[in-house]
Amino acid sequence: MKKKEHNNQAPETHSNGVLTVKNVTKKFGPNVVLDNVSLTIEKGETTVVIGPSGCGKTVLIKHLIALLRPTSGEVYFKDRRIDNLNEQELNGVRTHYGFLFQGGALFDSLSVFENIIFPIRQHGKIGNWKEVEELVKAKLAIVGLDGFQNYYPANLSGGQRKRVALARAIALNPEVILYDEPTTGLDPIRSDVINELILKLQEELGVTTVVVTHDMTSAYKIADRIIMLHNGKIVADGDADHIRNHPHPVVQQFISGQVSEDDLAILRMSGSISQAQFLPRDFEA
Ligand SMILES: Nc1ncnc2c1ncn2[C@@H]1O[C@H](COP(=O)(O)OP(=O)(O)OP(=O)(O)O)[C@@H](O)[C@H]1O
Ligand SMILES: [Mg+2]
């Protein structure tokens, strides 16, 4: 697997990247979530985005598929600018993407089979039913769940649901897969199954992969490149060793799971826990 250094300067050109974010600022009211971020993601690479909760990781990857539009700046899929396309135009572009969003929502009222063919239906690609059945079987086999076609999400474990969501994400043979917290809520072994699947898809199908995670074990295992977001900016960008040895204290605090002095100051200022607790009498009639 290739490992290389990246700088996070604005790209001179977006023509080498599969996904390019150019000088993107995203504000929600006064809240500046992305502050003039530039990033080029190259074909076949796995890029992992890390950073504290609320720092804008989900907002960033939603821009990559134009589920959110920048306040200013541009986003490209290959050479095509996508941030200014209408929903109908985007529908075509999005057939090249698979995505597994936070919560991994499967449709509870649909069987595993129906969940997986949902994107195929949505993009009007259903032809021969036999072929569709074979396709669902093949996608489920990739995630180790062939035979679960008639199950409903309620009857699956959390790990199985993530794997079905992954099978759905790859239903249209995407060139790009975006994963938002794919291992959250899973035990270490189930998490590692997801890591292995992410690696397998990247290695066997050559997909360009972007993964948001808090899980550094997963990040080190799957990443060609790790990007850390902090205060709306990219503060670190490089391979696993670059991140492990990064001099920025915010990076070291994050990867070692330490509480920062700022966070401690907030905790010290907040009221005592006993004052904030309900007492049994609070529930009495
Ligand atoms: N649709 C929205 N409207 C207003 N504010 C939003 C919206 N989406 C996100 N935000 C704000 O943008 C900031 C970044 O949110 P985001 O969901 O990207 O964080 P995150 O890094 O993915 O966090 P987590 O690790 O908890 O998932 C937060 O302050 C959030 O409140
Ligand atoms: Mg998020």
Image (cartoon, grey):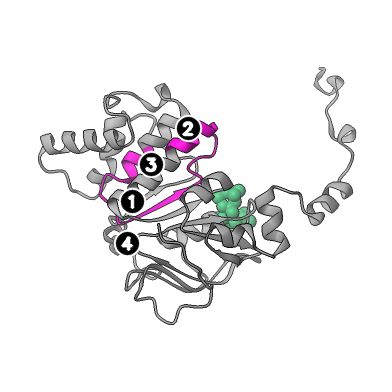
Of pointers 1 and 3, the one earlier in the residue sequence: 3
Q: Is residue 50 left or right of residue 282?
A: left
Disc 3 crowd, CA 10 A, few/some/many (<14, 14-19, 20+)? some
Identify the magenta region.
165-193
User: Magenta stretch: residue 36 in it?
Assistant: no
Residue on which the image places disc 2: 190
Q: Secondary structure at mark 3?
A: helix
Mark 3–mark 4 Cα distance, whole angstroms, equals 27 Å
Looking at the rendering, in which quadrant would you find the N terminus? bottom left
Question: Which numbered disc, 3 or 4, marks the residue closer to the eye?
Answer: 3
Q: Pointer 1 and pointer 3: residues touching (CB < 8 Å)?
A: no
Q: What residue sits right under mark 1 in the picture?
A: 203
Please, what secondary structure does the residue beneath circle 1 have? helix
Say which label, 2 or 3, has the lower sequence index: 2
- Which of the two residues, 113 or 227, is positioned nearer the viewer here? 227
In this rendering, is residue 206 above or below 113? below
